Image (cartoon, rainbow, N blue to C red):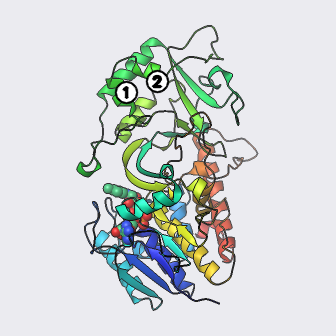
Amino acid sequence: MSKNPIHVIGGGLAGSEAAWQIAEAGVPVVLHEMRPVRGTDAHKTDGLAELVCSNSFRSDDAENNAVGLLHAEMRLAGSLIMSAGDANQVPAGGALAVDRDGFSDAVTAKIEAHPLITIQREEVPGLPPEDWDQAIIATGPLTAPSLAQSIAEATGADALAFFDAIAPIVHFDTIDMNTAWFQSRYDKVGPGGTGKDYINCPMDKDQYLAFVAALLEGQKTEFKQWEGTPYFDGCLPIEVMAERGVETLRYGPMKPMGLTNVHNPTVKAYAVVQLRQDNALGTLYNMVGFQTKLKHAEQVRIFRTIPGLANADFARLGGLHRNTYINSPTLLDPSLQLKSRPGLRFAGQITGCEGYVESAAIGLLAGRFAAAERLGEAPSLPPSTTAFGALLNHITGGHIVSDDEPGKRSFQPMNVNFGLFPPVEAPKAEGKRLRGKDKTVAKRHAITSRALADCRQWLGLPARAEAAE
Ligand SMILES: Cc1cc2nc3c(=O)[nH]c(=O)nc-3n(C[C@H](O)[C@H](O)[C@H](O)COP(=O)(O)OP(=O)(O)OC[C@H]3O[C@@H](n4cnc5c(N)ncnc54)[C@H](O)[C@@H]3O)c2cc1C
């Protein structure tokens, strides 16, 4: 059996975790990191797994929070990123925040000391050479330009994005369907639709004018100097559209034509906000054309004034920022392998996950999959009920491509969230159906305990009572 090394390109959150998992499986690794030979616009040190902005891994609550659950699963899987994070924790309430230098130093020291890992400080300028039969590209949101160009050439220019233009995504079960209704514009069925593919939220004239005024007044996030102002056709922020004239949105993403409000059929809406199904499970809907640079708190405040969204819970809020990522649902197989080049995997934020923890988790999976193949085994995919599986499915298959906007990329990076998990029935309390917050909490507990039990089974660990996690 070949014990040629597996090459990991990029020593960030994902690449460091991937290298660790491969080496722990007994397979040699060469980790290629370009810093300090070449820097990025955000990294400041030459340490591995440098945190470029916040020092938080977000909630550490494995029972009630999806990223907390991901922490727990990563710990079960022997994650280097989590053990270095735990060892360098700083006080942050229910969140796991870390001393960024201590954390990066700990990851670097562990990787340097591992007998099966060699670190090469060099830029990899293009796709891995053919004699690197197993390789993982984990070069992150700020992938060096010449490698990014090679990836674009190999995958098709349309398949690589350099900016997120993100519209907010809403949990379906928080949309008020007594106000909103299902209907496609002009009841068009299209190639894969039903004629009822969109959720429509109606506005009268006063509501529309107040909404446009709120967009204009709302606080916006500034672009970083090196980001420029990357407005492309088709992804203008809604507040920029609103600046162009009070009617612009009504002739753009908020046009009311071809729609009849089933709750009030004789009154024509003055404007309509449409939401489109975002994942195969049907638990998430994105707000069509609502990419925005409004600050997150402002988005929540203003978008909850939309009829039907008063209680909306957002799986992610809108944004527009520099990010290099590939169109994973079309390019990668379920084990993160480039379909057109077996043996070459992608990991981390470049696959279309978002955040330190998610990037490391995808690095962990890519490392395990690559190591298994090197050892002559089939990669073992995590169950879709686990946080690992939910995130992996979002990247490699759960996303729905819209048929009505041909040529437009609709896959957008996302943090792990409960909307990515297969739904569960809300448990009953003493035989009675739960409602409201109690129902939400009970469903979350059911999802997280199912996930941890399934994760243990996947990893071959003994079952354990969930309360002991
Ligand atoms: C400005 C900014 C702020 C962010 N803030 C946050 C935040 O607050 N919280 C959060 O959770 N996430 C944040 N993110 C996202 C964050 O970058 C990712 O979640 C995480 O770092 C991604 O991990 P990664 O391993 O995929 O990429 P990275 O951690 O960026 O690692 C990629 C590594 O690859 C190296 N590299 C690149 N090209 C090459 C090449 N050709 N050859 C060799 N090496 C190469 C880089 O030097 C880098 O070390 C931010 C991103 C940016 C750009």
Residue 57 in view (yes/no): no
Q: Is residue 391 above or below residue 427?
A: below
Of helix, strand and loop, which one carries label 1? helix
Q: Is residue 464 above or below residue 118?
A: above
Kind of residue sitting beneath label 2: Gly
Count residues near mark 1 (Cα–Cα under 10 Å), then give few for <14, some for 14-19, many for 20+. some
Residue at x-position 37% and y-position 39%:
297
Which of the two residues, 340 or 108, is positioned nearer the viewer here?
340
How far across and down, in percent of the image, does residue 237 sit? 38, 34
- Marks 2,1: beta carbons within 8 A: yes
Of the 4 image quadrants, the one containing the C terminus is bottom right
Residue at x-position 41% and y-position 59%:
149
Quarter of the image holding residue 406? top right
Residue to which mark 2 is pinned: 252
Quarter of the image holding residue 432? top right
Regarding ligand 1, which quadrant of the image does it lie in?
bottom left
Residue most extreme to the left: 225
Using residue 275 as the reference point, say whether residue 281 is left or right of it.
Answer: right
Mark earlier in primary sequence (2, 1): 1
Q: Tell me: is circle 2 under 8 Å from ligand 1.
A: no
How far across and down, in percent of the image, does residue 196 sit? 68, 28
**Residues under labels 2 and 1: Cα distance?**
9 Å
Count residues near mark 2 (Cα–Cα under 10 Å), then give few for <14, some for 14-19, many for 20+. few
How far across and down, in percent of the image, does residue 28 sit? 51, 87
Residue to which mark 1 is pinned: 241
- Tag shown at residue 2: none
How far across and down, in percent of the image, does residue 201 sit? 55, 24
Of helix, strand and loop, which one carries label 2? loop
Residue at x-position 27% and y-position 42%:
222
Kind of residue sitting beneath label 1: Met
Residue most extreme to the bottom: 115
Q: Is residue 219 above or below residue 73?
A: above
